[in-house]
Amino acid sequence: MRRVYLDNNATTRVDPLVLEAMSPHFLQDFGNASSIHEFGQQAREAVETARQAVADLIGSLPKEIVFTSGGTESDNTAIRGIAASHADKGCHLITTTIEHPAVLRTMEQLEEEGLQVTYLPVDRQGLIRLDDLHAAVREDTILISIMHANNETGAIQDLRAVGGFAREKGILFHTDAVQSAGKISLDVNDLEVDLLSLSAHKIHGPKGVGALYIRHGVEMQSLLLGGSHERGRRGGTENVPGIVGLGKAAALAREGLADFELRVRSLRDRLETGLLERIPQARINGSTLRRMPHTTNLSFRGVEGEALLISLDLQGIAVSTGAACSSGSLEPSHVLKAMGFENRRVESALRLSLSRMTTDEEITTALDVLPRTIRRMRELSPLYRESRHRVQREGQRAHS
Amino acid sequence: MYSEKARELIRELPNRGSLAGATHTARAENPICGDITHLYLKLHQDVVVDSRFETYGCPAAIAASAAVTQMCRNRRIRECREITTESILEYLGGLPSHKLHAADLAVDALRKALRSNGP
């Protein structure tokens, strides 16, 4: 069976060049980057080379990069660190309803601890309205945390506008750029971002490593206490192989940005257009104008997403859904719900996400298998039959 | 996550579709998760000689519906009434713990169909 991987927003295949770069740091150059002997100094050099590569990817200084265990730790550190360090200035934070759980759960915990959080709504395109942000700001607002690109829809927020506004108001601005860093061009100075989270495994690097950009001069507490690693901003022996992997992945991603924009976008568009042409009553969820080039989120009326996911998986195609039926209740995607879609549309949503390793053949296979599978599942679906009859009746009424 | 038997049923979808000449039918719905099952039975005297299903829902709901159509076929009404959530789970080789309600939906559809008076 030909396997097709279209779930790259969940994780990506490690680039062989990344694996090759990491490999010596397990058996040969295995030193602790804090040690002063040669083993340690080789490790330190490798870590600093990686730091430069990550800094180059987002237009920062190397000293502004702190390595972490991944996007979740970066988000937690940024939000909790600022909340703790700026408690004397205020207790209000602003975020959105469509953030990753790494941000939402952290915000909720801060609320339990007595801080106040405003969750900005989004429109049906999955985008915040700047007016809402302007209205939410208070005298005691200390942090705005708004994701760059959404993991489910690929919708891209206007961070330049947010960053400019935050700077003008003197409020720190964090963005979760886990889904965008290394895929589209971004520059922390251009966006006027103060803190930015990114992750290696979304850009063909290893799992368990990420980075947090902290603008020089921004004071914040460390989440992990221990040694003076990472300039005292994150305790714990550096994960040297992982950091080297992140550095290599960042360098490769930077070299491939133009290709990603052109080739991956063209593959995504071919997939999306092909599916819309072949499958009636299919709809795109979210903005098509401000959107990542590799993501599409589609709802197919009358087909339950998880059932479709398993049917596709049985045919070798890996995708992701927008909702999960669990313990007798539906847990719909908080993102699609926040965009105002009704349950049936949310539960029939499928996310297809490509990477620079996605091939033309994979798209051809997906365009062959998906329409066939959806047609078969609709034959099985009383909901689709009922909706088709309703459409036919309405059509007949319109004619008579 | 899903047993080999459940995966086989989801892949093959045996007994799918409506049934012309069905003598007993039922629609069952889980009002919370929104899964819907239509069950069609054709009885000759008191034996189920044919059975079909249509289901909108998660993979577990589809597998449980397919299972119940297989389990009740060529069985007497009395035997069909003995099909329970547990026996469906046993037939399927289990379901993920958070999906057990899917077997309840299939049993609900079967019992309603057996009580019904034709399509």
Image (spheres, coloured by chain):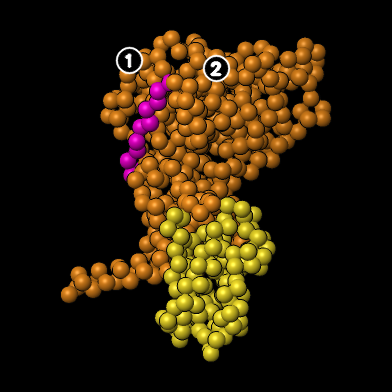
Chain colours: A orange, B yellow
Q: Quadrant of residue A283?
A: bottom left
Q: Is residue A150 above or below residue A306?
A: above
Q: Residue at image x 78%, y 21%?
A: A31
> Of A241 and A310, which appears nearest the observer?
A310
Q: Residue at image x 41%, y 40%?
A: A155
Residue A72 lies left or right of residue A162; in this view the side is right
Q: Residue at image x 62%, y 12%?
A: A232
> Of B81 and A147, which appears nearest the observer?
B81
Q: Which residue is mark 2?
A: A64
Per the rendered image, the range of residues in magenta is: A115-125
Tags 1 and 2 in contact by the CB under 8 Å rule? no
Q: Residues within 10 Å of mark 2 (few under 14, many from 20)?
A: many
Spot occupied by residue B56 in the image (x, y as percentages of width and height): 46, 64
Q: Which residue is mark 1?
A: A139
* Identity, as a three-letter code, of the amino acid under mark 1: Glu
Q: Is residue A263 magenta?
A: no
Residue B105 lies left or right of residue A69; in this view the side is left
Spot occupied by residue B73 in the image (x, y as percentages of width and height): 59, 80
Q: Is residue A119 magenta?
A: yes
Tell if the residue under mark 1 belongs to the same chain as the one under mark 2. yes
